[in-house]
Amino acid sequence: MLEQGTISIHTENIFPIIKKSLYSDHQIFLRELVSNAVDAIQKLNMVSRAGEYAGDIGEPEIVIAIDKDKKTVSISDNGIGMTAEEIKKYINQVAFSSAEEFIQKYQGKSDQPIIGHFGLGFYSSFMVAQKVEIDTLSYKEGAQAVHWSCDGSPAFTLEESSRTTRGTTITLTLLPDEEEYLESARIKNLVKTYCDFMPVPIKLEGEVLNQQKAPWRESANNLTKEEYLEFYRYLYPFQEEPLLWVHLNTDYPFIINGILYFPKMKPDVDVTKGQIKLFCNQVFVSDNCEEIIPQFLTPMRGVIDSTDIPLNVSRSALQGDRTVRKIGDYIAKKVGDRLKELYRDNREQYISAWKDLGTFVKFGVLNDEKFKKQVEDIIIFRSTAKIAQKAAETPAVEVQSQEGDVWQDVTANSQDAISTTPYTTLKEYLERNKERHENRVFYSTDEATQATYIELHKNQGLEVLFMDSFIDTHFINFLEREYQDVKFTRVDSDLDNTLLDKDKASEIVDPKTNKTRTEVIKELFEKALNKPKVNIRTEALKSDDPQGTPPAMVLLPEILRRLREM
Ligand code: ADP
Ligand code: MG
């Protein structure tokens, strides 16, 4: 070893870098100074609760004032204040925060977290100010009020102040380029964006600007349905009500709070762009969480608040971060749990939300193995299964049909015209049709154009599932891989000739042309459907009832009617 030592830093050189390059965005200076003010008030609470401050803590408040003549913006709080010693320690030493010490000393004295951490926020004020002043009086008995001033060079002055009220005022004399912050509209906007959910009233010109309450920090039991909806409307005004929501709340192995909503999938909603708001200790950080939540959750909305998401690293680095990945997994699991809970406890709501949820769930299943395992048994399909008429007549509470595992949507339409669309899981479908279907699943990708085929199947007592959303094309491939022993057959695809009833099929029904029954029906179908090649399953020509008309025959009048219309 040649030498051992400590790296030294020249303040003159590093100071401009801290001021200009620490944050890319000048406007966050306000967020930082308000956060410090909130912390100061929070700290006073903690000290008071610990019995170390006998004085009156008063009504906590933060007041922002603009002086256009002097070109200053000031932020005042009635929090803990600072002594000269504390200014020397926490302000004059860059990157030195009091937060850690404080939390250790007063642990358990607050349910509200301290925002500060790195001891850098204060210096962001030099991005917009040519001069920064602190006027402060500590809560400590006999403390002397002090005034600190710095013009952006590493030199500062510290002198006695005549201040008599406890708390701190930070005054920024703005740089010529930054005078936009003298506009109260600009400040209001910034407070709304960054400080809306901070737990102290923030005032400008006598008006309280922020909402203060952060519902995601409440426990789920304390919130009513209306409160969840109200919060959604607040975050996303003029939007339709969400389908359901998930309240995230964990302390281990990472801290995360939040409320995530499933919105209705509207064509005008761009679901590819994330709209979940990211917070850190109730301070707004970013308008989307795309790097944090798994991609399939992108359509969700709401709020995630976590101190365990590193905010000072690049967004692409976030994706590789292990904690962030774990947080993503946790959120996906919570979402899956919520869906399962709804499926179990409120089938009716589950079904009526399925149109919107389905795409989302299937997308998740295709993209995320763990999510797939979680929800594969609660994927449902609209079906042609017959439902006991009684079920349709019973009030909406009674959703389970008389035939067991077919579920119906009784809420989708208006109250008087109750929809009786049945839904089923694949498992239930296979179980129900074990004998008749021989492990085949019949599905339709388009109810309108495949109507005739659907009828054909129904008339043979075969159940058809509708897989007609845009994602189903991919989803069917997935199902085929998952259920290797099941044969998935589209209702209008080429069919299995082994099922032919040779006798009936080859029976000549048109003596003039010598055409067999199959040939005649085939031709009619081809014409009716305007398709050059149609394969007819001759099972369609059989009848359960030996004396009865074969089911396909029942369709003939309909086919002929169509032909006449052509
Ligand atoms: P951080 O907030 O991460 O601790 P800052 O650079 O924002 O870092 O602030 C440094 C320190 O200065 C704080 O930890 C706190 O001790 C002190 N401080 C800043 N603003 C105030 C204030 N308004 N009232 C009391 N103390 C303050
Ligand atoms: Mg700070």
Image (tube, rainbow, N blue to C red):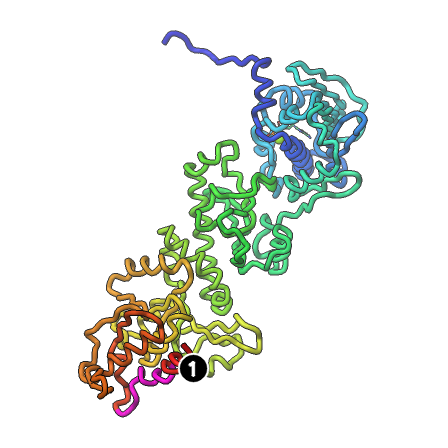
Residue 405 in view: no
Q: Main secondary structure of the magenta part?
A: helix
Q: Nearer the viewer, residue 548 or 105?
A: 548
- Label 1 sits on a secondary structure element that is loop
Question: On the picture, is 399 further left or further right than 200?
Answer: left
Residue 456 sits above or below residue 269 on the image: below
Q: Is residue 30 magenta?
A: no
Residue at x-position 30% and y-position 88%: 549
Q: How many marks?
A: 1
Quarter holding the C terminus is: bottom left
Whole-percent x and y of residue 70?
A: 79, 25
Q: Is residue 549 magenta?
A: yes
Residue at x-position 52% and y-position 35%: 311
The region drawn magenta spans 547-558
Three-letter amino acid code at the position of disc 1: Ala
Q: Nearer the viewer, residue 18 or 528?
A: 528
Q: According to the image, label 1 marks what residue?
A: 388
Quarter holding the N terminus is: top left
Residue 479 sits above or below residue 253 on the image: below
Residue 149 sits above or below residue 284 on the image: above
- Quarter residue 518 falls in: bottom left
Q: Nearer the viewer, residue 104 or 459?
A: 459
Q: Nearer the viewer, residue 179 or 521?
A: 521
Residue at x-position 67% and y-position 33%: 30
Whole-percent x and y of residue 449?
A: 39, 70
Q: Ligand 2 falls in which quarter?
A: top right
